[in-house]
């Protein structure tokens, strides 16, 4: 049986828009694979590369005349980087499923072109595999899609290419790509996963690496979430049952008067964690001089094709929470000036960016905002990474809220107690320093986000002189 | 209005035997279906000006609460102690007061508006008690990390209790998809009908059991296993939803010692079979909190001790459940892991006194714990043998407490034809383990042989051989491995055995241990005697180690591998040796 992929019709218009202008474009195919059905949700053009030779961040200042005009001049690292950034924006259960190309050559016939296609797919696979907690590579299949539209004939062709095979003996199969005029229904599943853990640490010798701490939190969260039991709308469901069966049951139960209610209602998810019985049966004993309090929520909204099973939905929710944590931590650490919390610092507050939702078609993808950033920042990444124009009002910013100052107030109270070594002066100094740090952070992050923006060129030059 | 009152026959029996100088006691009971059932009692020792009943309450299954007091005189005046106890009764508005004078005349009163009102009561027989009530056993492990100080432990355990009581936990009946969970202030149930009772659930878990078999199993108390899961997601509909994104705060403090350990919660609740599953939620929350309080007291006691003040020598608490036959309800104790039973005698002595238990035999040692089952072996098969009707002039005296049935071919070891005395010895050994006299493992055939070689009774070639042993060898081994002395009796013929009947009766009454008997080519275990003092007619309750079949109680009982035998069971012409293991008074 030929693999069939269902795609919304706007994807065709999207391709035609570029093909008719006879522009060479490469981009990512985003979608969801379930046992029953494979859906594409969106095609996202890879932003134009400013310099094909290097991808290091400082190089963006150079002139941008060098736009890749054909597939062979595209940097696979650049596309893979795009895939990495887009993965952060995908809810659990959705993946970069492959790439699309609009060009006048036949990329499947020309061996040079096709080998470039394979190179790109392999590179994406490699890059997405770096952080397992990002769930970058779709675990259900190793066959990535390649969709091609000829700019001359407007003919569409789709094949799948195997990635990740050890000997690179790539298997290539034809794929049937179907445009469906009817809008795909999605079942939304929501939850707020809560963290509230305090644990002791040893600071005094070498300080604490934020990155290392986040990595440990991620590992333990992964273990916990994997072992958890999931309820949907307060009930334990049969994993083999399809989501649509549950919807049907609900309808027959409650909705006798109003059967026309097609808008999928959100399902509420709760996770229950059994306590591990695998701990060593001993009392561990160590001297500590600090503690870490990791707290707050990860809001999760995943969208499942109604034909998907409950088990698939459960996996998607779990992936979503972990992927979101991993995304924030990576973004936070990338923006850190110094990873090390030094022994001199008595209190330190790390606030990774928070999740916001951005509408794409009938579902929501997400983006992350650093403290102090406005929703407008999300518009930029949506435009750059998803090639999509939305308005500020479209961004849903209140699924999570930034930390309020009460944490700091609590610190002030603590600081006056004898337990804490920090004197009030030190504490206020800390506030001051943190304030500056935050400001710098915001600045740097906005710079990173504005990378491609020509308006920022001057400012960037200015800054790069300052820093490099 | 005062509730209907039932008193367990165990309580009546204990009250009739109680001998104390204390003036006051406490009554413990539970409410079900508009009825107050008194299940237990304690003596109030008022040691160190502390009310000991509050602490004892933590040792009782959840649902069992303080319900009244005992006055060891028949005046109806309110002393300060009595007032204090009655003041602490929360389970009913009308606390119960039982008065007991020197002639052991018992009167029962409800205290209604500060006035004593004598009341009638029903006695609940033990069979009905075990039929109408069942136990739920909650097991879970909470990882805790805190500063190694009394304040640190107190605070972390309080946090854990709060979390459990806040509706964030859910309970799963093991092996089912039944989950009980808290929703805001309400309770939910999934996996089964909300109308189901706990008794119906248990019956549905063992559908194959015929009612006859169930009746036979009255002697074993099974607990429904439940585990705890923690809710890690927030209710979206909750008004208190705080949506602050994840953040990390690092604080530096003065260096301090920290401990981190897996805290095992293992706790029981006693529940009427007709209780709705939905109502079980709050019971299990209470059971968890009770267990956490008991764990806390054990940890704090350790931290307060010299030498482990900084937590370095802190031992993991271990939970044991006891069901002393005379008490008729569970007592849960938590002790530090690895501390030998011998060095905790004072605590046990206090508990014995508080529960008015005799100081003659171990009751709360590790070996006495109820759920520590022998791996697949049948326990106390004689309890499944049909009971004889009591006749005048006939004394029946049988083994006390629990033992495991050891017989041929167990543990994939072929000892058919030579190992019967070894197996009999193992059965006796297991008895000493289950009565708490020892924690030494039951020795294998080889270990028994090694022991006999070591003491010089046998040459070294004996090890690994298939040579028989007799009563004296059993005596040597018990003495060497356990420090247990035995009496040896000789009978020249099977008929001479009969003359020992009064002595056997006395043995079971005072020591209660199984007896090994060897004669001719056979060894058996004697578990009891029935002696007619007029006719001298004697029957023996025999456990036969020569059984080679599977661990099937119906075969063992129906085919007579365990059962009553007449005196013609013994070979008239053979010599017999009996080994009567003796116990020492200890606790």
Image (tube, coloured by chain):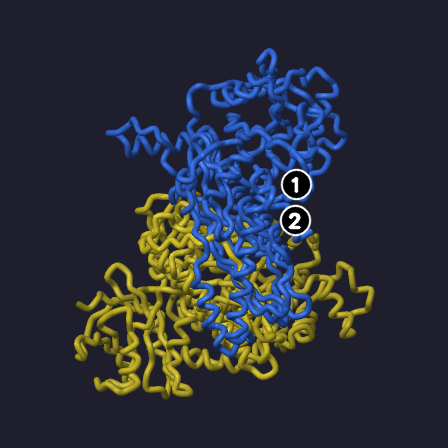
Chain colours: A blue, B yellow
Measuring from the top left, give residue A309's x and y in whole percent: 48, 33
Residues at circles 2 and 1 in contact by the CB criterion of under 8 Å: yes
**Who's the residue at 50% across and 20% down the image?**
A13
Choose top left, top right, bottom left or bottom right for residue A258. Answer: top left
Residue B9 can be seen in this image: no
The residue carrying mark 2 is A464
Q: Chain of mark 1?
A: A
**Who's the residue at 76% across and 67% down the image?**
B450
Q: Is residue A79 left or right of residue B191?
A: right
Residue A290 can be seen in this image: yes
| On-image quarter of the N terminus of chain A | top right
Compared with B412, A18 (above or below) is: above
Compared with A152, A268 (above or below) is: below
Between the C-alphas of marks 2 and 1, the distance is 9 Å
**Who's the residue at 40% across and 39% down the image?**
A393
The residue carrying mark 1 is A61
Measuring from the top left, give residue A92's x and y in whole percent: 52, 39
């Amino acid at each position: 049986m030929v693999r069939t992929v269902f795609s919304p019709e706007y994807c065709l218009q999207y391709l035609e828009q570029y093909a008719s202008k006879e522009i060479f474009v490469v981009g990512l195919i985003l979608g969801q694979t379930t046992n029953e059905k494979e859906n594409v949700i969106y095609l996202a053009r890879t932003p134009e590369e400013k310099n094909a030779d290097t991808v290091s961040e400082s190089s963006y200042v150079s002139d941008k005349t060098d736009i890749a005009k054909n597939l062979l001049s595209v940097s696979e690292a650049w596309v893979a980087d795009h895939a990495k950034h887009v993965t952060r924006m995908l809810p659990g259960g959705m993946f970069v499923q492959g790439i699309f190309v609009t060009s006048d050559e036949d990329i499947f016939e020309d061996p040079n072109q096709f080998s470039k296609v394979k190179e790109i797919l392999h590179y994406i696979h490699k890059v997405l595999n770096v952080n397992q907690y990002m769930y970058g590579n779709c675990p259900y299949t190793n066959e990535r899609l390649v969709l091609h539209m000829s700019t001359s004939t407007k003919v569409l062709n789709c094949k799948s290419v195997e990635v990740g095979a050890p000997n690179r003996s790539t298997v290539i199969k034809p794929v049937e790509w179907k445009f469906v005029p009817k809008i795909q229904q999605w079942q939304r599943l929501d939850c707020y996963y809560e963290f509230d853990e305090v644990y002791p640490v040893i600071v005094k010798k070498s300080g604490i690496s934020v990155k290392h701490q986040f990595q440990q939190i991620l590992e333990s969260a992964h273990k916990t979430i994997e072992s958890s039991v999931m309820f949907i709308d307060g009930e334990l469901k049969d994993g083999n049952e399809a989501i649509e069966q549950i919807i049907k049951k609900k309808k027959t139960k409650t909705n006798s008067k109003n059967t026309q209610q097609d808008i999928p209602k959100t399902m509420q998810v709760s996770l229950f964690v059994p306590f591990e019985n695998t701990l060593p049966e001993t009392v561990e004993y160590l001297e500590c001089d600090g503690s870490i309090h990791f707290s707050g929520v990860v809001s999760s909204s995943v969208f499942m094709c109604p034909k998907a099973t409950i088990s698939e939905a459960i996996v998607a929710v779990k992936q979503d929470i972990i992927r979101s944590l991993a995304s924030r931590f990576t973004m936070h650490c990338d923006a850190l000036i110094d990873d090390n919390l030094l022994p001199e610092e008595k209190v330190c507050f790390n606030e990774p960016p928070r999740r916001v939702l951005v509408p794409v078609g009938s579902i929501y993808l997400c983006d992350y905002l650093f403290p102090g950033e406005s929703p407008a920042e999300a518009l930029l990444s949506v435009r750059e990474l998803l090639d999509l124009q939305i308005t500020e009002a479209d961004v849903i910013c209140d699924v999570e809220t930034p930390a309020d100052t009460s944490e700091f107030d609590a610190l002030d109270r603590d600081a006056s107690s004898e337990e804490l070594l920090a004197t009030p002066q030190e504490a206020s100094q800390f506030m001051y320093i943190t304030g500056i740090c935050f400001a710098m952070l915001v600045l740097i992050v906005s710079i990173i986000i504005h990378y491609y923006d020509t308006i920022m060129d001057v400012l960037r030059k200015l800054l790069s002189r300052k820093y490099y | 209005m005062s509730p209907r009152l039932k008193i367990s026959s165990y309580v009546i029996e204990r009250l009739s035997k109680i001998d104390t100088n204390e003036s006051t006691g406490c009554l413990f009971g539970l409410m079900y279906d508009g009825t107050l059932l008194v299940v237990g009692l304690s003596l109030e020792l008022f040691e160190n000006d502390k009310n000991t009943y509050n602490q004892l309450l933590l040792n009782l299954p959840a649902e069992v609460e303080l319900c009244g007091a005992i006055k060891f005189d028949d005046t109806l005046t309110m002393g300060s102690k009595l007032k204090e106890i009655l003041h602490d009764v929360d389970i009913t508005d009308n606390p119960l007061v039982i008065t007991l004078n020197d002639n052991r005349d018992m009167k029962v009163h409800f205290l209604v508006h500060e006035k004593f009102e004598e009341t009638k009561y029903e006695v609940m027989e033990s069979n009905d008690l075990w039929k109408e009530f069942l136990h739920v056993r909650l097991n879970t492990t909470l990882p805790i990390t805190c500063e190694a100080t009394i304040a640190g432990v107190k605070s972390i355990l309080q946090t854990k209790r709060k979390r459990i009581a806040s509706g964030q936990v859910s309970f799963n009946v093991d092996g089912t998809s039944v989950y009980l969970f808290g929703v805001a202030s309400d309770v939910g149930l999934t996996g089964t009908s909300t109308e189901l009772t706990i008794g119906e659930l248990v019956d549905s878990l063992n559908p194959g059991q015929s009612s006859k078999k169930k009746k036979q199993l009255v002697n074993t108390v099974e607990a429904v296993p439940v585990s705890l899961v923690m809710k890690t997601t927030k209710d979206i509909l909750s008004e208190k939803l705080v949506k602050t994104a994840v953040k990390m705060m690092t604080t530096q403090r003065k260096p301090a010692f920290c401990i981190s350990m897996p805290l095992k919660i293992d706790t029981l609740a006693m529940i009427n079979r007709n209780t709705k599953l939905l109502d079980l939620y709050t019971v299990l929350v209470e059971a968890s909190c009770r267990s956490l309080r008991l764990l806390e007291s054990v940890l704090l006691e350790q931290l307060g001790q010299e030498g482990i003040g900084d937590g370095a020598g802190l031992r993991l608490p271990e939970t044991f459940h006891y069901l002393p036959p005379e008490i008729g309800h569970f007592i849960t104790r938590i002790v530090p892991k690895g501390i030998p039973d011998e060095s905790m005698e004072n605590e046990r002595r206090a508990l014995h006194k508080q529960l008015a238990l005799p100081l003659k035999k171990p009751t709360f040692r590790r070996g006495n714990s109820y759920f520590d089952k022998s791996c697949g072996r049948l326990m106390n098969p004689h309890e499944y043998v049909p009971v004889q009707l009591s006749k005048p002039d006939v004394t029946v005296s049988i083994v006390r407490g629990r033992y495991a049935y050891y017989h041929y071919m167990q543990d994939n070891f072929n000892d058919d034809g030579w190992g019967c005395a070894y197996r009999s010895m193992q059965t006796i050994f297991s008895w000493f383990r289950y009565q708490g006299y020892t924690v030494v493992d039951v020795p294998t055939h080889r270990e028994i042989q090694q022991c006999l070689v070591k003491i010089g009774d046998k040459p070294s070639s004996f090890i690994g051989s298939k040579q028989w042993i007799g009563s004296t060898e059993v005596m040597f081994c018990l003495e060497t491995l356990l420090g247990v002395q035995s009496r040896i009796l000789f009978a020249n013929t099977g008929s001479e055995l009969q003359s020992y009947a009064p002595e056997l009766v006395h043995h079971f009454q005072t020591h209660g241990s199984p007896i090994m008997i060897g004669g001719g080519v056979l060894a058996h275990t004697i578990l009891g005697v029935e002696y007619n003092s007029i006719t001298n007619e004697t029957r023996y309750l025999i456990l036969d180690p020569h059984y080679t079949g599977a661990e099937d109680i119906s075969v063992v009982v129906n085919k007579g591998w365990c059962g009553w035998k007449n005196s013609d069971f013994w070979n008239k012409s053979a010599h017999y040796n009996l080994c009567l293991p003796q116990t020492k008074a200890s606790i």
